Amino acid sequence: MKTNITMRDIAEKLGVSSVTVSKALNDKEGVSADLKLKIKQVADEMGYRYNTSARAMKDGRSYNIGVTIPERFTGMTQSFYLNVYQSLSKTLEQTGYYGILHILSSDDENSLVPPRIYSEQKVDGLIILGQVSKEYIEMMQSVNIPVVFMDFYDEKTDMDAVITDNFYGAYDLTNYLISKGHKRIGYVGNLYATSSIQDRFLGYYKSLLEHRLERNDDFILNDRNEEGKFVDIQLPDPMPTAFVCNCDQVARLLINKLVLHGYQVPEDVSVVGFDNDAYATIGFPELTTLAVDVEEMARTAVQFMYEKVNDPTKKFGRVQVKGRIIYRDSVSSPTVPPQKV
């Protein structure tokens, strides 16, 4: 295998000129954004190594993109956002950039302190991954580098955000439960915590409305406090025959709670999650869930950032990426009413 990959090698593989490859790899005009991205992806696949230090000195860029995650979404129990960060980092490298992880402390968020990697001019743009406060969103929209928000949005119409299709994902999950015969279906999630939890609840509620099923507010269970920390889930009495959970981790916590109180899943109570992260398969039963297309979300966010770095006037608005249901073992037809062991 050839180890010293040149621009000519890349050009021959793509059927373009070496000049075109050079322009693309050095972010020069005369090459479309799509072709630039394709050339950089092929260069990465072939093992071409960019001289980013020389490029940075030449054009004043760092070729780093900051990925900021609020600290409440990190740690050993939070696998989803770290998985997204890994996808972002891999996709950024394909475009000649590197992802720098920054954990946003609660104190900095409350005090509206911008990420240090921005203040010290170490990055050309920032991807904010995970819900932050309205005040922090407004502050970040005033910084002088491109910002893309990811996995949440706000009422601000001018914010560029990449999210999964939370509404129709939860709608499809609830429809699936109804198709299995469930009519008493609950929802688990703090409706005021994040835009994602709200949209998943609204998708769940739309399904109930379309099937003319009553929404019982006693079946809407809280899973976390205002700081985003999980709380003990309080089971209702009487019980629904199924629950839609706002994420897989919460679904796993709910299953543990149900088993502790003598219920079997899915024989007595069916449970579905959302995300298809590590929690979907680490316990019994494995979760039926909505798989978020993390790689497509990462590609979209990086494409937005790449174009905004090259043209700060670019605006994309809110873009949704569709997921798909993964059918596993946590759903069955209901027994009425649910029976304890």
Image (cartoon, rainbow, N blue to C red):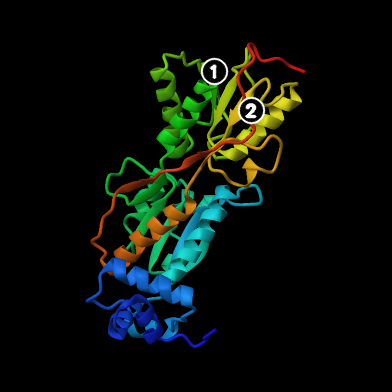
Q: Quadrant of residue 133?
A: top left
Does residue 229 appear in the picture of this structure? no
Residue on which disc 2 sits: 233
Whether residue 166 is situated above or below residue 146 in the rendered picture: above
Circle 2 residues within 10 Å: few <14, some 14–19, many ≥20: some
In the rendered image, the vertical position of residue 98 relative to residue 22, given as above or below: above
- The answer to whether residue 168 is left or right of residue 103 is left
Residue 4 in view? yes
Disc 2 element: loop
Which quarter of the image is occupied by the N terminus?
bottom right
Which-is-in-front pick, marks 2 and 1? Answer: 1
* Marks 2 and 1, how far apart at CA: 25 Å
- Residue 134's place in the image compared with 37, above or below, is above
Instruction: Give the quarter of the image for residue 208.
Output: top left
What residue lies at 52% left-to-right and 31% top-to-bottom?
A: 190
Res 181 label:
1
